Image (cartoon, rainbow, N blue to C red):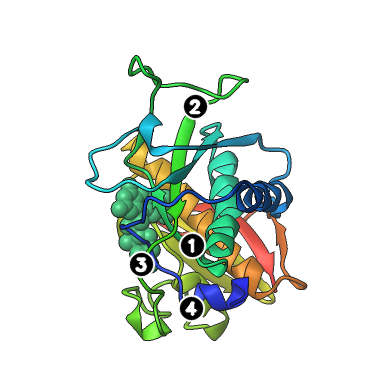
Amino acid sequence: MNLKDMIYHRKSFRSYTDEQLDVNTLRKIEDFIKNAKRLYPGEKLSWDIIGPEKIKCILPWRAPHNIAIYAERSTEALVNLGFVFQQVDLYLQSIGLGTCWLGMGKIADEAGEEFTDHSGMKCVMMIAFGKSEENLRSNAGEFKRKTLEEIADRADEKLECARLAPSAVNSQPWYFVHSGNTIHTYCMDRFFRKQFLGDMNKMDVGISLAHIYIENEDRFRYFTVENPPAEKGYLYIGSFEI
Ligand SMILES: Cc1cc2nc3c(=O)[nH]c(=O)nc-3n(C[C@H](O)[C@H](O)[C@H](O)COP(=O)(O)O)c2cc1C
């Protein structure tokens, strides 16, 4: 399946075999990450592929490989992270691997100390991946999500790809407002005072924008407007045309 098809079949995998991927596959994954489209090309983003032994996590399962993702904590950096790595999530599932975004994990060295990338940026998210015996979803009916009416000012089939996006604790914090050919994108700000979930919700909005980009690769144009319509309880993120 190609990346577009994966939007309608992907899921979070929470069981993996111990099998390690070969060097060639890992190199292709690195190349995909380097070449994935950036929403904010100026934002710093770095990553390492690490084994399960470096992860401290309360979850009962581990994957043989994990992407540790390092970024700043600005809104743009977090939205960009979600946008880039959701393309990676779709790519990994398209080559037959299981994945799961992992906000609950921390990476640590042998002494239990959290570590940073070479420029001092913290690991703010991980993605577990590897071979799994679980199956993909067979159709869009298997997704538990809000309706099209709940995620936008009007039901718009063009937003079906965004509706199906994964999000932290399935919170689906995205909201879309139409204005002519432009669609403004917002993030629900319910959790912003709790920095941890607030940060993840900004990544979630980047994740849903990645689905819109993959579905409309040739037409997607993203920009920021000066005076977006104010939406109570929501933070304006950016606008796009497709
Ligand atoms: C930013 C982010 C963080 C997540 N963190 C975790 C996590 O720590 N543990 C976990 O089991 N699932 C995690 N998930 C997976 C979500 O629970 C999952 O995407 C959501 O429930 C929708 O299910 P689906 O991915 O199977 O469609 C995370 C997802 C996102 C996008």
- Asked if labels 1 and 4 touch by Cβ distance under 8 angstroms, the answer is no
Q: Residue at x 60, y 59 (%)?
A: 87
Please state which amino acid type lies under the numbered disc 1.
Leu
Q: Nearer the viewer, mark 4 or mark 1?
A: 1
Label 1 secondary element: loop
Gap between marks 3 and 1, in whole Å? 9 Å
Gap between marks 3 and 4, in whole Å? 19 Å
Q: Is residue 197 positioned above or below 152 on the image?
A: above
Q: Is residue 41 left or right of residue 152?
A: right
Q: Which mark is residue 97?
A: 1
Please state which amino acid type lies under the numbered disc 2.
Lys
Q: Position of residue 32 (x, y in %)?
A: 68, 53
| Quadrant in which the C terminus is drawn | bottom right
Q: Position of residue 52 (x, y in %)?
A: 38, 38
Gap between marks 2 and 1, in whole Å? 27 Å
Circle nearer the N terminus (2, 1): 1
Q: Nearer the viewer, residue 86 or 232?
A: 86
Circle nearer the N terminus (4, 2): 4
Label 3 secondary element: loop
| Residue to which mark 4 is pinned | 8
| Residue to which mark 2 is pinned | 122
- Asked if labels 1 and 2 touch by Cβ distance under 8 angstroms, the answer is no
Q: Nearer the viewer, residue 135 or 225?
A: 135
Q: Position of residue 31 (x, y in %)?
A: 71, 49
Please state which amino acid type lies under the numbered disc 3.
Glu
Instruction: Check mark 3 vs ligand 1: CB closer than 8 Å? yes or no.
Output: no
Q: Is residue 76 positioned above or below 97 on the image?
A: above
Circle nearer the N terminus (3, 4): 4
| Residue to which mark 3 is pinned | 133
